[in-house]
Amino acid sequence: MTAPLEQRAREAAAPGRPNTGRPAFATGAFVTDLARRLHAGEVPPEGASMTAMPTPPTILLDNDLLRRLEAAIAAAGSAEVWATQHGISASFVSEIRSRQRPFSPRMLTALGVELVRAYRVVDGAAEGGAASPLARLTRRDRQVLAWLRPDGAPRKRQDVEAGGWRPLHEDLRRLAALRLCQETPGGWAATAAGQEARAAIEAGESTGGGGDA
């Protein structure tokens, strides 16, 4: 995707552009999708009509949904009338308005809203969407990394002195899911990423910057 295409996408999505038929806002996802469509030739060339472009979805948070409900009730005349129109208990509507109950599927349908699943990038996530392993490590995870051999050689759980600490299988499997260690015929071994994570943790501790969750 070239820079000119992204520039065209942003200009097309800019608030106040005439004849778009869209709300005066655009999300990053909308701009990215529009640039993709420009690149694929799915959108008319520059200077042509832009009315066929995709409309960004309106995402509502809890407060937005409550305001939508209040507007619908005001239009109906009262909460009782609105509830009766949609076959919903007036007492249930009252509990929702006071935030004692969550919106039910029937309530969402009555408001012309659907529930969608969304995801957000966690704190410390690296650019490109991959979360940094260090940002997700707990104190226990770091203890397990310290138990693994720093050179990546395998180590068995039973190879500890009497009374010595050793990780649980669940601990090791969690690090394996993070691709920081792996099970081998000779035992558990830190992967290259695990060795780097351990070195980064030790470097942070040596400079006084090694905090954890």
Image (cartoon, rainbow, N blue to C red):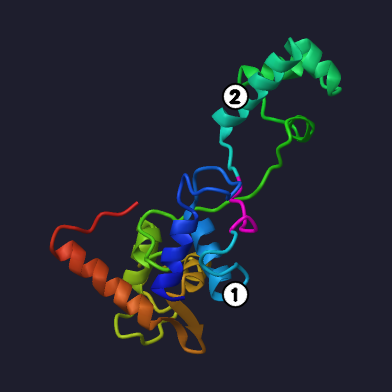
Residue 123 location (% of width, % of height)? 38, 54
Judge from the rendering whether residue 212 lies leftward or rightward of residue 94; answer left or right.
left
Query: Can the viewer see residue 129?
Result: no
Residue drawn at (35%, 51%) of the image = 213
Judging by the rendered image, the residue that carries numbered circle 2 is 67
Alpha carbon separation for disc pair 1 and 2: 40 Å
Q: Which mark is residue 41?
A: 1
Q: Which residues are magenta?
A: 50-57
Q: Is residue 76 above or below residue 134?
A: above
Query: How busy is the neighbourhood of tag 1: few (under 14 within 10 Å), some, or many (20 plus)?
Result: few
Q: Is residue 170 above or below residue 101?
A: below
Residue 197 location (% of width, % of height)? 32, 72
Q: Secondary structure at mark 2?
A: helix
Helix, strand or loop: magenta stretch: loop
Q: Which mark is residue 193?
A: none
Amino acid on which the number 1 mark rests in the picture = Gly
From the viewer's side, name the closer residue of 193 and 138. Answer: 193
Amino acid on which the number 2 mark rests in the picture = Arg
Residue 68 location (% of width, % of height)? 64, 26
Q: Is residue 100 above or below residue 55?
A: above
Looking at the rendered image, the disc whose residue lies closer to the viewer, 1 or 2, is 1
